[in-house]
Amino acid sequence: MKLDEEYGLDRRIGFETDDEENQAERAYQNDDNDDTDSDIVLPSRNASIDLNSPSWPQTYRKSMDMYTSVTPPPSLSFLTGTSFKKISDSFLTSPYKRSHPTLPDSSFNKPLITATSLDNEEVPPSTLPSKLSTSSYSSLSFNELPSPQQCSYAQSVLNAINVLCGIGLLTTPYALKEGGWSSLLLLFVMGIICCYTGILLKQCLDSSPELKTYPDIGQAAFGVTGRILIAIILYMDLYSTCVEFLIMMSDNLSALFPDTHMDFAGFHLDSHQIFAITATLIIIPTVWLQDLSLLSYVSAGGIVTSVLLVLCLLWSGVIDKIGFHPSGTALNLAGLPVTVGLFGFCFGSHSVFPNIYSSMKQPSKFPSVLIISFVASVLIYAGVAICGFLMFGDSTESQYTLNMPKKFVASKIAAWTTVLCPFTKYALTITPVAFSIEELLPLAQQRSYSVSIIIRTVLVISTLVVALSVPYFESVTALIGSLLVMLVSIILPAACYLTILHGRLSKMQVAVCIFIVIAGVLCAIVGTYSAIASIADKMG
C-alpha cells in the first residue's frame, strides 16, 4: 500500500478488524487489487501487533444486529406454515453447524485505518456490496442471526428509542426519591452528554470504512488490548442485564403472589427464590433455540411495552384515583450517588449504536436520529419519574410496579408486562456472551451443538446464582449504571475519539472530551463505591 508521506508511519494502523463481514470485505478487495497492493504491514502507533488470526470477538456485530430491527426479517412470515416449521425445527433438532474456511492471509494484513482515510474529516461507510458471496460470508455463519437490513430514517429512530427505553424506566421514580427534585437536572445533563458521546462514536466509525463495531473502535484507539477490554466490558454489561431480568421478574411475581413458599429437602424457599428459579427454568429452552428471529421481532416491541407501562401508571394515578401528592426534598446529597447510577443505567445503549449506524440507508442522518431518540427518551424518563414520585412519595419502591395496588386491572397489566417482557429479551441478551465464549473453544467443539447448549445453560444458571445471591434490584442497577454504563456510554467514547482523531481536533473539542472523561470517572468512582457499600450493608 502506498502511504501519504505527510502523515508518516505513525498515522498507519495495521491490525485486523473484528467481524466476519469485514474480513470478507477485505478479502473481496484483495482479490481485485492483488496486482497493485503489496503486503507491507506497518506498526500501529499504539502497539506492534502481528497476529496470524483475527482478534476476539468475531461474532459481536452479527449477534448485536438482533437488537436493531423493528421489523421482522424477510424470511419470517406469520401467514405461512413454513415460518413456524423453521422455528420448531430450530429447537433441539437442527444441527449446530458453522463453517470455517480460511480467508487469505493478505486480508488480515490490510490496515484498519489507512493514511488515506485519515486525510478526510468524514469518511463514508464502505461501499462494498452488503451481500457477499456465500463462500465469503461463511467464515462464521450462525443460523440464529438474521441478515442485516438497511433501515429507513423512521425505523432507525424507532430502533434507537427501543434500545434506550428499557427496564431503567421502572427505576426513575426511585432515583428521583433518592436524589431529590433537583436531581432531574442530572437526568437531562446525562442525556445530553450520552447523546454527544453517541455522536462521537459515529465520528470514530467515520474515520475508516473498516470500523463497524464498538470493539473495532477500541482496537483502532488502543490496539488489540483495547479491543479485548472493551469487548469484556460490553459482555459484562449484557450478562448483568440478564441478572437484572431475573431479579425483576421474581420481584414482580412475588408482589402478585406474596404468600408463595416451599420447603424442599430441608431448605425453605420464599416467593422471590421460587419465582427466580421458575423463571430460569422457563427461560432455558429459549436460549437453546437455533433461530432467534421470532424473539428478535417480539422484543422489538420494547417501545410498545414502555408506552403500555407509562399508560398503566397514569391510569392508576388518574382513573384509579391514587392521586398525585407533592412530597420529597429539593436535593438529597446522601442519595445522589444512587441517583447517578440509576439515571446512568437508563442510557446504556452505546454498544448498539454502531449497529444502528451501519444499518441506516442514510448514515449521515445518524446524529439527528440520536437527538430525536434521546429527547424522546429523556422526556419519557422524566415524566415517569415525576408522576411515579408524586403518586407514591417516600414509599416509592425500586420498581414503581411494586407500588401499584394489585387490586386494579392497570396494576396487574403493568406487573405482567414487566414479567413477560424479559422472557423475549433474555435469550437475545445472553446470546452474544455465549458466542464470545464459543469462539475461544477448539474448532471441533465450536461445531458441536451439544457444547453450545451446555455453555448457554451454564450461563443462564450462573445468572440465577448471582440473582439469588444479590437480589437487590436498585443496588445492582446502580452498580451497573455507575461502573459499566459510565465506561461504555461516557468515558470510553470520549477517550477513543481523542485517541483516533488526535491532531485534527480543536482545543474546544479536546477540552470538552477531557471534561467528559474526568466527570465520568468521578461519577463512576462515587457511584460504584456507593452501590457496593449498599449491597454489602444489605447482605450483612
Image (spheres, rainbow, N blue to C red):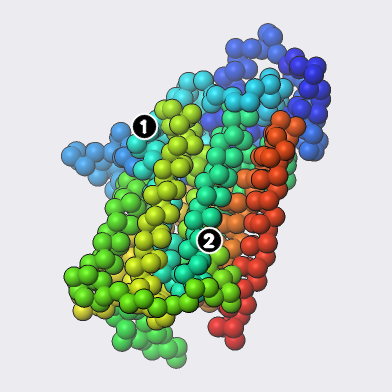
Compare marks 1 and 2 and give the one earlier in the sequence.
1
Residue 5 seen anywhere in this rendered image of the structure: yes
Q: Compared with residue 451, is residue 38 higher up or lower down, i.e. above or below?
A: above
On the image, which quarter does residue 258 sit in?
bottom left
Identify which residue, 404 or 173, lies in the foreground: 173
Judge from the rendering whether residue 414 lies leftward or rightward of residue 165; answer left or right: left
Residue identifier under label 2: 186
Q: Secondary structure at mark 1?
A: loop
Q: Quadrant of the C terminus?
A: bottom right
**Residue at point 40%, 30% (across, down):** 150
Q: Residue at x 55, y 83 (%)?
A: 538
Residue 421 in percent (x, y) is at 34, 60
Which quarter of the rendering shows the N terminus? top right
Residue 49 screen position, x and y as percent: 77, 36
Give the amino acid type for the residue marked by disc 2 in the picture: Leu
Q: Which mark is residue 152?
A: 1
Where's residue 375, x and y in %?
42, 48
Q: Position of residue 147 (x, y in %)?
A: 41, 34
